[in-house]
Image (cartoon, rainbow, N blue to C red):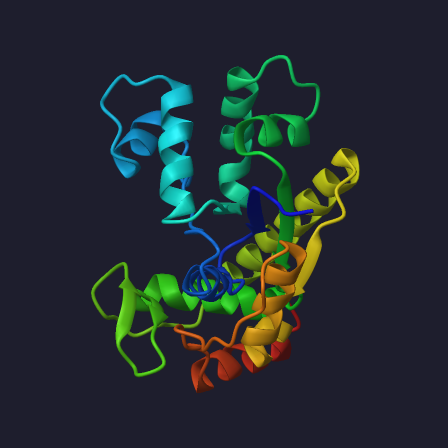
Amino acid sequence: MRYDSYIICTSPRSGSTLLCRMLQDAGAGHPDSHFHTASLADWRRAHGVESGADLAKIVQAAKRTGSGEGDLFGMRLQRHSFEFFMHQLGLLNPECSSDVARIEAAFGRTLFVYLNRTDKLDQAISYVKAQQSGLWHRAPDGTEIERMAPPAEPEYDGARLALQRDTFTGMTAAWEAWFSAQGIAPLRINYSDLSKAPSHEVNRVLTALGRPAVEIAPSVARLADQVNRDWAQRFAAEGR
């Protein structure tokens, strides 16, 4: 059976931008963090809805954004956005008795994709390094896709890495608990598999959605370099 929508459940620096861009290039909607911040005002601005518009109108506008030119809605749901998002869907569909029912009342039959990065230290290093350097994503040709701050040299901070590693570990536990509580068996994708064979993993999603497989090249490059490796070795040497 074909799905009306899919939600990529994930956390930062898991490869979600790569996956979202490739799915969009494959014609599978326009997946992005359409409900990223805990603010209805931000949601309205993001989807071009007039100030004061009600929740139902915001969600409808977001569905149009996330569907692109097609009939399939896609979105990325970061764990830090989860609670506010689900609270709003509860207000929109108070008659529903579960989170899955609330999601499907808003977006139709939904495939849940769980994108996880097993190595939490590597994930933490990627996150802290991006915050410090300002560069979050780059294309294969070296062109910057997303920069959040002026260029800066990243500096090792073991305590910060440990805290971020533990934060990501907690996010993984929270996703797993939610899947179990809701009876969800998500399509699971691991960062390491996505980075090694991105086209294969994208086609796993397309197949699960009932869409034809495609040949597609990645439009986002890995940023890991010797700095990442040096930080990992230093962190291990510190016995953290």
Image check: 147 left or right of 38?
left
**To which quarter of the image does residue 150 belong?**
bottom left
Task: Give the residue at the far bottom of this rendering.
Answer: 226
**At x 62% / y 41%, what residue is drawn?**
110
Residue 74, image x, y percentages: 49, 47
Q: In front here: 161 or 170?
A: 170
Where 88 falls versus 170 (above or below)? Answer: above
Image check: 58 left or right of 82?
left
Q: In front here: 113 or 224?
A: 113
Residue 48, image x, y percentages: 25, 34
Image check: 2 left or right of 180?
left
Residue 113, image x, y percentages: 63, 52
**To which quarter of the image does residue 198 belong?**
bottom right
Image check: 133 left or right of 12?
left
Visible residue check, residue 158: no
Task: Give the residue at the far top of this rendering.
Answer: 95
Where 89 falls versus 237 (above or below)? Answer: above
Q: In front here: 148 or 76?
A: 76
Residue 145, image x, y percentages: 29, 67
Count of residue discs: 0
Visible residue check, residue 137: yes
Q: Say which quadrant the C terminus sits in.
A: bottom right
**At x 53% / y 24%, what residue is drawn?**
89
**At x 61% / y 74%, what residue is drawn?**
200
**At x 38% / y 66%, what residue is drawn?**
130
Where 88 falls versus 124 (above or below)? Answer: above
